[in-house]
Amino acid sequence: MGSFKGHVLPGTLFLLVGVWHIWSSVVRYVSNPKTFRVRVWSPVPGFDGRLKYLELYLIAIGAFIDMCIELLYSTHLKFFVNGVLNPSHMNDFEHSGMLLMFFIFGLVALLSEKTRFLPIPEGALCLVASTAFCAEYLLFYFHSTTHKGLEGYYHLLLVLLIGLCILSTVAGALLQTSFPVDLCSGIAITLQGLWFYQTAFTLYGSMMPDGCQLKDSLISCHSTDSEVRGELLANFQLFSLVLGVLVAVVGSYVFAASRYGHSDLRSLQD
């Protein structure tokens, strides 16, 4: 069983990174299509380079803070009971493992970019990022907390979005000059962040479908029809988010092309 804050915090991190990835990908492409390369992270321009690695710091620090909350605060430091891992906090241990992978990715990318100790090419960094998404996928697919009913359906849709993140990130390592692949990666990460938010507001907030309720940390529906209506609502919510993101992507592309468009961009369109 999750919580509102437990979904909003990671959702915020994914949303910020995803939106920045989309915008950066679009700007880099329209600025010079012929030299475009896939990037698993994007530097922040300007500010005399002081914010260049902001995205990587956000990933590493955000994942570390969330990991500490899951591992230290949520467990109340009661890691073991009778010599074994505390079964009542397996959910927190699993989340900590997932967040550890994103922290490792952020740390590895920072070491690769800022030091000479770990010179990793961009394609390899894409594969490192994909392992973090794989860990997240496995966590939600083989969760110790059995998600059933309406809650299970929302998490099933989340797993599908995570799978899209894996595929687009791996494709970025293989097709390093593909703008659609890079853009798809940003869209998938953004949708994952938005779906975390949607899950939080629907299952743990004020948007609970009629006929369903949250009681004693369990989500239940009064009838099968109520559960089906809730699942249909989830489909509509996901469709709305996908449509909204696609409209935003097209709008950002039009704006970026008008402001930063390279002369080669028009020749490619012709």
Image (spheres, rainbow, N blue to C red):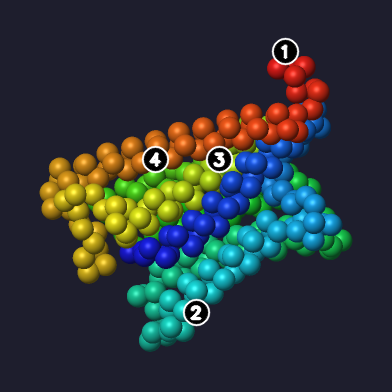
- The numbered mark, 3 or 2, whose residue comes first in the sequence reads 2
**Residue 6 occupies which quadrant of the picture?**
bottom left
Q: Which of the two discs, 2 and 1, sits closer to the camera?
A: 1
C-beta proximity under 8 Å, tags 4 and 1: no
Residue corresponding to mark 2: 72
Q: Classify 265 as above or below 259.
A: above
Q: Who's the residue at 59% across and 69% down the image?
A: 64
Q: Amino acid at mark 1?
A: Asp
Mark 4 lies on a secondary structure that is helix
Residue occupied by mark 1: 270
- Quickly name the residue at label 4: 238
CA gap, disc 2 to disc 4? 33 Å
* 84 in relation to 21, above or below: below
Instruction: Work out whether mark 1 precedes mark 3 in sequence or the reverse, and give the earlier one.
Output: 3
In the picture of the structure, the residue carrying the numbered disc 3 is 187
Quadrant housing residue 74: bottom left
Please determine whether, in this image, residue 147 is positioned above or below residue 93: above
